[in-house]
Image (cartoon, grey):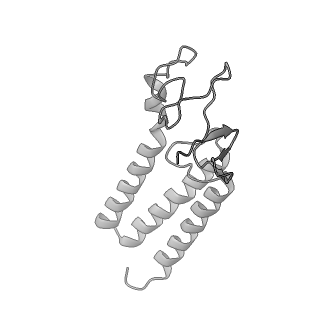
Amino acid sequence: MELSAMRTDDRTESASGATSTLLAPTWRRVDGQEAPAGSAVRPDGPDDAPREDAEPAPAGPVAQRSNLAIWLVLAAVGISVLLGVVADARVGVLGISATLAAGGAIRAVARTAPVGLAVRSRSVDVFMFWTLAVVIAVLGVVAPDV
């Protein structure tokens, strides 16, 4: 006995009359034709195929400027660690706390989200930066023999 399937939108009807919902998406072309059954590739081509209407990605200074926040934070943390080793551990901890507070202030004020500072929504990021800055500063000041 041969089972044949007829496609109607998102359901499959077998010869026995049972109906089941398809788990795979049905790709349709602009002209209304369906993709071949079991096709792993969209009918209009793979996702990585170049498109005529795609704009070229900006190159050069934009990519360098977008990493500026990451480099500034890395430099500030490096200077804080160096101050902690050379001068006093408490000074280093306060430097890291100041870096977190500055990151929160930049995230709160900047119109476009800096690449290294934007992780979640603006309010959550600012809250996390400032809360961590306060907690680390308090622990650095209160901790004995640091």
* Residue at (37% x, 84% y) in the render: 145
* Residue at (45% x, 30% y) in the render: 63
Residue 84 in percent (x, y) is at 35, 66
Image position of 81 (left or right of 55) = left
Residue 102 in percent (x, y) is at 56, 53
Q: Along the line of sight, which residue is nearer the eye, 33 or 85?
A: 33
Q: Would you place residue 40 above or below residue 32 in this image?
A: below
Q: Would you place residue 97 above or below residue 8 in this image?
A: below
Residue 21 in percent (x, y) is at 66, 51
Q: Along the line of sight, which residue is nearer the eye, 56 or 22?
A: 22
* Residue at (64% x, 39% y) in the render: 6
Image position of 14 (left or right of 78) = right
The quarter holding residue 123 reads bottom right
Q: Would you place residue 124 above or below residue 36 in this image?
A: below
Q: Along the line of sight, which residue is nearer the eye, 122 or 48?
A: 48
Q: Quadrant of the C terminus?
A: bottom left
- Residue sitting farthest toward the bottom: 144
Image position of 144 (left or right of 22) = left
Residue 72 in percent (x, y) is at 44, 45
